[in-house]
Image: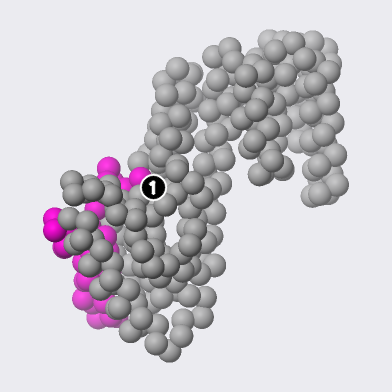
């Protein structure tokens, strides 16, 4: 069994893969998957779907729960009891009965932590494999075409932020392993969508410098300085300034090892 939310929201069982239909049902399943097997009180689920729940919200939620159960059962009869209601003094709670290895979001978080631990332990080959596996779980933007409150979207944004961090760490690891200018397109792609990330600028500077393009590395730093100052009103960090100074004095050893300063 697999429950996936890192892209299209879908459920896979022996009978095949089902794309979950209906925006409110997709939003409900996302909220349940993010809880990773924990119970969610009804009021919290309401606040995950609506910023201002309508008067009919409780009845609507029960309807969406029933629809989700039917879709799970249609995927496989083995899934009929996976969406559980837990009674309580404060009202009903709901949870998705799923093991961590059945949830792509849980697998992603676990691999992200393991890859970073491997990187910190100076095991770049292992870190490269683990971080790449984590990123391979993503099949597109998350929380798309879902009924979702601002709170649920904030949780999705936190995951997107972690994805960016993993992409940056993977580039830093690959720099350690000897990659240089072949990383430039990937880093450029990341900066197009997230233009204020200093680690990405540091990775781009290092990729260009270590690939022999010192002038390109310094131009990247100048661009970072302009973007951060004009758009955010902030100066370069001390780490990025130190990296620029090392490049100006052609301190290649410092440039090679400085990835640990940024990717931590």
Q: Is residue 55 above or below residue 83?
A: below
**Residue 82 left/right relative to 172:** left
| Residue sitting nearer the eye, 235 or 19 | 19
Whole-percent x and y of residue 94? 27, 69
Whole-percent x and y of residue 234? 81, 45
User: Where is mark 1, residue-wise?
Assistant: 105
Whole-percent x and y of residue 147? 46, 69
**Residue 69 left/right relative to 165:** left
| Residue sitting nearer the eye, 84 or 188 | 188
**Residue 208 left/right relative to 87:** right
Residue at figure coordinates x 45%, y 30% from the top left: 131
Q: Is residue 222 above or below residue 21?
A: above
Q: Does the magenta stretch include residue 168?
A: no
Q: Quadrant of the C terminus?
A: top right
**Residue at the extreme bottom of the image, as rendered:** 55
* Magenta part of the chain: 77-106
| Residue sitting nearer the eye, 89 or 153 | 153
Element at label 1: helix
**Residue at the extreme left of the image, as rendered:** 78
């Amino acid at each position: 069994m697999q429950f996936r939310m890192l892209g299209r929201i879908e459920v896979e069982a022996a009978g095949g893969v089902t794309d979950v239909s209906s925006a409110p049902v997709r939003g409900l399943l996302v909220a349940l998957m993010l809880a990773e097997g924990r119970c969610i009180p009804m009021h919290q689920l309401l606040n995950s779907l609506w910023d201002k729940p309508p008067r009919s919200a409780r009845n609507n939620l029960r309807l969406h729960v029933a629809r989700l159960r039917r879709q799970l059962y249609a995927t496989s009869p083995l899934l009929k009891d996976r969406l559980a209601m837990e009674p309580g003094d404060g009202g009903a709670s709901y949870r998705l009965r799923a093991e961590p290895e059945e949830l792509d979001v849980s697998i992603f978080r676990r691999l992200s932590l393991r890859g970073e631990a491997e990187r910190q332990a100076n095991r770049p080959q292992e870190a490269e494999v683990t971080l790449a596996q984590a990123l391979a779980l993503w099949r597109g933007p998350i929380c798309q075409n879902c009924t979702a409150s601002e709170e649920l979207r904030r949780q999705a944004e936190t995951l997107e932020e972690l994805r960016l961090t993993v992409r940056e760490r993977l580039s830093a690891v690959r720099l350690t392993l000897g990659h240089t200018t072949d990383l430039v397109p990937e880093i450029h792609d990341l900066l197009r969508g997230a233009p204020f990330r200093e680690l990405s600028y540091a990775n781009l500077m290092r990729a260009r410098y270590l690939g022999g393009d010192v002038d390109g590395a310094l131009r990247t730093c100048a661009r970072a300085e302009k973007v951060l100052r004009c758009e955010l009103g902030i100066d370069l960090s001390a780490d990025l300034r130190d990296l620029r100074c090392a490049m100006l004095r052609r301190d290649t050893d410092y440039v090679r090892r400085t990835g640990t300063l940024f990717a931590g």
